[in-house]
Image: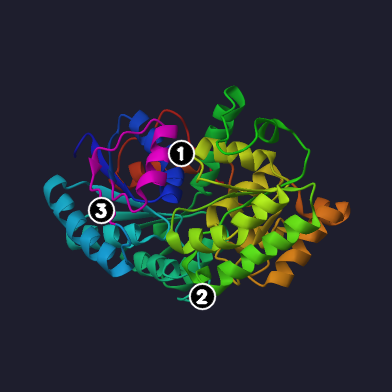
Amino acid sequence: MKAVRTISLVFGTRPEAIKLAPLVLALRRDPRFHCQVCITAQHRQMLDQVLAAFAIVPDFDLDLMRPDQDLAGFTARALLALNEHFKQHRPDLVLVQGDTSTVLCASLAAFYNGVAIGHVEAGLRTGDLRAPWPEEANRVLTSRLADLHFAPTERSRQNLLHEGIAPDRILVTGNTVIDALFLALDKVQRDPPLLPGLPQDLGAAKAEPPLVLITGHRRENFGEAFEQICLAIADLAERFPQTRFVYPVHLNPNVRRPVQAILGGAGERLGNVFLIEPLSYLPFVALLARCTLVLTDSGGVQEEAPSLGKPVLVTRQTTERPEAVDAGTVRLVGSDRATIVREVSLLLRDPAAYASMARAHNPYGDGLACERIVAACASHFGLPASANPLASGP
């Protein structure tokens, strides 16, 4: 039996990097494993920011990003590059996270090379292959290829069981994003970061003035939906002049064009809309902790914000993370202008409505997900148990 097993973590986007960073750190501390990090750089700049925040230097950088890349072009390049990578380096296990095109390509390339696959954040489903697109298809296809399924919640486990995945291949771990959030909060509290593009007193304030944090990047919202969301934000900024609306704008031109066209002028005219460049992870966590509520189409924010008692309004029609909706801390509002204005206004005006959502309750875990995944990897290889016993459940 090999004394040390090589585990390759493959990722390419900011959300994957955030959620895998604590797992990289945990594996690199464990003498039972040799941990390799291979990045596709599907999101170059935003990925590098996260790596720097956690002081992670990749072992392999495939650097596959191209200007105006489409999904087919990136998928073709990624599959070929990862196929050659696995042929040369032959890890014992490949770990992927979530539902990006990098996840699908890495899983398929590992499968072609006979390498076992572990899927972190397995089992999320909307039941609609086109919402979110292409993420739902990516994660469904990855589940057919994976050997180990690390489900963040019991509902995710049930989704996998319903699809015929064997129970002994599924482990409910909690979501690694909570592990990352706890690490980041500790860093932020010890050394508060600067918030580029914002007045210093706005970032430093604890409660006043009210601050709405906005993010958006989903492909299914490109076009008219993004325009409606931006028009809603402009309406709200005019209706609530004492509230600050802070929008770190995603680098994708399909996002930046409508945001700048509609909100750029509103920001100059009203003075309470701040369009800033994407924040690195630690400043973003600081802003998340500071804000009053969040308006987003992001999956990760739906998982992080409930731990901080922040209501989340999701500008999508469906979510693969229904646990927080059931808990009452997340609400779907879609991309309809009037609906967004109504729901944000309710939270800003009605203390009781706000309090009902601002409960610091998180159904996504306790910050020990990475410990459970590391233990499961050791068990998969028949390695001796760690001297630090694993908690039994999330």
Q: CA distance from mark 3 to mark 1?
A: 31 Å
- In this rendering, which labeled residue sits more in front, label 2 or label 1? 2
Counting from the top left corner in percent of width and height, residue 17 is at 41, 45
Q: Is residue 40 magenta?
A: yes
Q: Which mark is residue 127?
A: 2
Q: Is residue 275 above or below residue 51?
A: below
Q: CA distance from mark 2 to mark 3?
A: 30 Å
Looking at the rendered structure, the secondary structure element under dot 1 is helix
Please identify the quarter of the rendering in which residue 347 is found: bottom right
Residue holding disc 1? 371
Q: Residues within 10 Å of mark 1 (few under 14, many from 20)?
A: many
Q: Residues within 10 Å of mark 2 (few under 14, many from 20)?
A: some
Please identify the quarter of the rendering in which residue 377 is found: top left
Counting from the top left corner in percent of width and height, residue 131 is at 50, 73
Q: Is residue 46 above or below residue 207?
A: below
Q: Which amino acid does the dot numbered 1 rest on?
A: Glu
Q: Residues within 10 Å of mark 3 (few under 14, many from 20)?
A: some
Q: Residue visible at 42% across and 39% down?
A: 49
Q: Residue visible at 34% across and 68% down?
A: 144
Foreground residue among 313 and 256 = 256
Please identify the quarter of the rendering in which residue 135 is found: bottom left
Can residue 294 be seen in the rendering of this structure? Answer: no
State yes or no: discs 2 and 3 in contact (Cβ < 8 Å): no
Counting from the top left corner in percent of width and height, residue 39 is at 29, 46
Q: Quadrant of the N terminus?
A: top left
Q: Which amino acid does the dot numbered 3 rest on?
A: Leu
User: Which comes before the other along the chain, label 2 or label 1?
Assistant: 2
Residue holding disc 3? 64
Q: Residue visible at 45% across and 41% down?
A: 370
Range of magenta residues:
39-66
State yes or no: discs 3 and 1 in contact (Cβ < 8 Å): no
135 on left or right of 191: left
